[in-house]
Image (spheres, rainbow, N blue to C red):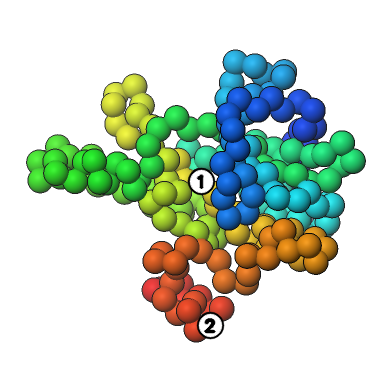
Amino acid sequence: SRMSSVSFVRIPISNVVHISDPEECAFGFVQLVELRDRPSSRFVLKTLRESVRFSPEIEEYIRLMSSVRSKYVLPLLGVVVEEDGKFKGLLTEHCDGQTLADWSVSSRSSWSSDASFREFCVLMSRICEGMSDLQADGILHVDFKPDNVLLQSDRSGALVPHISDFGLSPLLSVCSSALSSSGALSGVSGVFGTLGFISPELETTTEADVLS
């Protein structure tokens, strides 16, 4: 199958150099890092609270996430592994820009101009294209929100979106079930997303209405 032919890079944790303090998040920690063999580039490392052994299901999720090719989706570059080979975290490109949430607040006062409105429409079209690319590869984001859209400007000054954290919640749920009863990922359940952005029907059922 196409998925079985997709490979992903395993990066030894010894090759990772931390250049910022870790920030705690729902699934573990996020921090800025460099790689010893690529010291001029910066990346984002998202680590679990506790490493977990690879399973066929975990590898399948990672292959699926690694298969995405879209200019509007932040790519997964590889997975970081412990010395014993356990899965520790995900490595992505570092997008040095503001989020869609921050931009929408800072730019709201200028949306009344024709130029700003056209910029807004182009940006939304690009975000929709990125989400369409994800779905074309069989991936549901499940935690799509303005904070998970990172923005950068191209050479012309136009905003380029980079959709991040796609498929992360289901992967963490699989990791959670693979861990012991330590509770390291006990906050991850079968309902994914962020309150205020999830489909309203998920408050009462795990069956998502794709039209909502």
Q: Position of residue 85 (x, y in %)?
A: 87, 42
Q: How packed is label 2: few (under 14 Cα within 10 Å), some, or many (20 or more)?
A: few
Q: Residues within 10 Å of mark 1 (few under 14, many from 20)?
A: many
Image quadrant where residue 47 sits: top right
Q: Picture coordinates of residue 114 (x, y %)?
A: 11, 41
13 and 149: which is toward the camera: 13
Locate residue 151 relative to residue 61 in the image: left or right. Answer: left
Q: Residue 76 occupies which quadrant of the picture?
A: top right
Disc number for residue 128: none
Tell me the kind of residue under disc 1. Answer: Ser
Task: Pick whichever, 37 or 185, lies toward us.
Answer: 185
The front one of 49 and 43 is: 49
Q: Earlier in the sequence, mark 1 or mark 2?
A: 1
Q: Residue at left 56%, top 78%?
A: 206
Hey, what amino acid is under mark 2?
Thr
Q: Furthest residue to the bottom?
A: 204
x%, y% of residue 62? 70, 49
Q: Secondary structure at mark 2?
A: loop
Apparent side of residue 79 relative to residue 139 in the rendered image (left or right): right
Image quarter of the N terminus: bottom right
* Alpha carbon distance from label 1 to label 2: 26 Å
Looking at the image, can residue 117 be seen? no
| Residue at numbered disc 2 | 205
For the point 29% across and 31% down, the residue is 158
Q: Residue at x 65, y 28 (%)?
A: 18
